[in-house]
Image: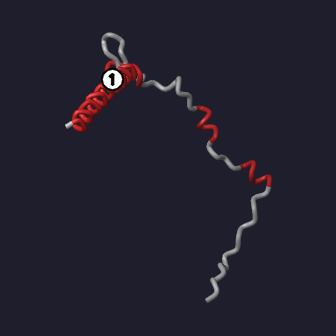
Amino acid sequence: MAPKKLSAAVPPPPSAEEEEDIDFGEDEEEDYDEEEEEGFDLGAVLEPFLATEDGQTVCTALVTISKHMEMQNKILVKILSQLSKKEKDT
């Protein structure tokens, strides 16, 4: 079965004169300026939640946690190796 051809005519491309008259709303984007917008600073609002009184931020806390977990894993590997040695000896 052959595919059906569409009988709708394709409109001709717009001429150069018509293209100049098309407005895409670019003027609205140029008028918008974030500095003129009145609102609140998101960083200032979140600062109490993302930093301690000592000045420690979430990032520094995560780095500290990472270092502690790394040390704990090293200790656990040593304990496991000692336990496996004892198990082999018995």
Q: Position of residue 17 (x, y in %)?
A: 79, 52
Examine the image and state in which quarter residue 67 appears: top left
Q: Residue drawn 35% across and 20% down?
A: 64
Q: Residue drawn 29% across and 32% down?
A: 81
Which quadrant is the N terminus positioned in? bottom right
Q: Single out the residue that lies furthest toward the left.
A: 90
4 over 83 or under it: above or below: below
Q: Position of residue 46 (x, y in %)?
A: 36, 23
Q: Position of residue 85 (x, y in %)?
A: 26, 33
Amino acid identity at mark 1:
Met
- In the displayed structure image, the side of residue 5 where residue 48 appears, left or right: left
Examine the image and state in which quarter residue 59 appears: top left
Q: SS class of the residue under badge 1?
A: helix
Which quadrant is the C terminus positioned in? top left
- The answer to whether one can see residue 45 in this image is no
* Between 11 and 86, the one nearer to me in the picture: 86
* Between 56 and 27, the one nearer to me in the picture: 56
30 over 36 or under it: above or below: below
* Between 50 and 87, the one nearer to me in the picture: 87
Q: Residue drawn 41% across and 22% down?
A: 43
Q: Position of residue 72 (x, y in %)?
A: 30, 25
* Between 67 and 29, the one nearer to me in the picture: 67
46 over 7 or under it: above or below: above
- The answer to whether one can see residue 63 in this image is yes
- In the displayed structure image, the side of residue 82 where residue 35 appears, left or right: right
Packing grade of label 1 (10 A; few <14, some 14-19, many >=20) is few
Residue position for label 1: 71
Q: Single out the residue that lies furthest toward the front.
A: 89
- In the displayed structure image, the side of residue 2 where residue 45 appears, left or right: left
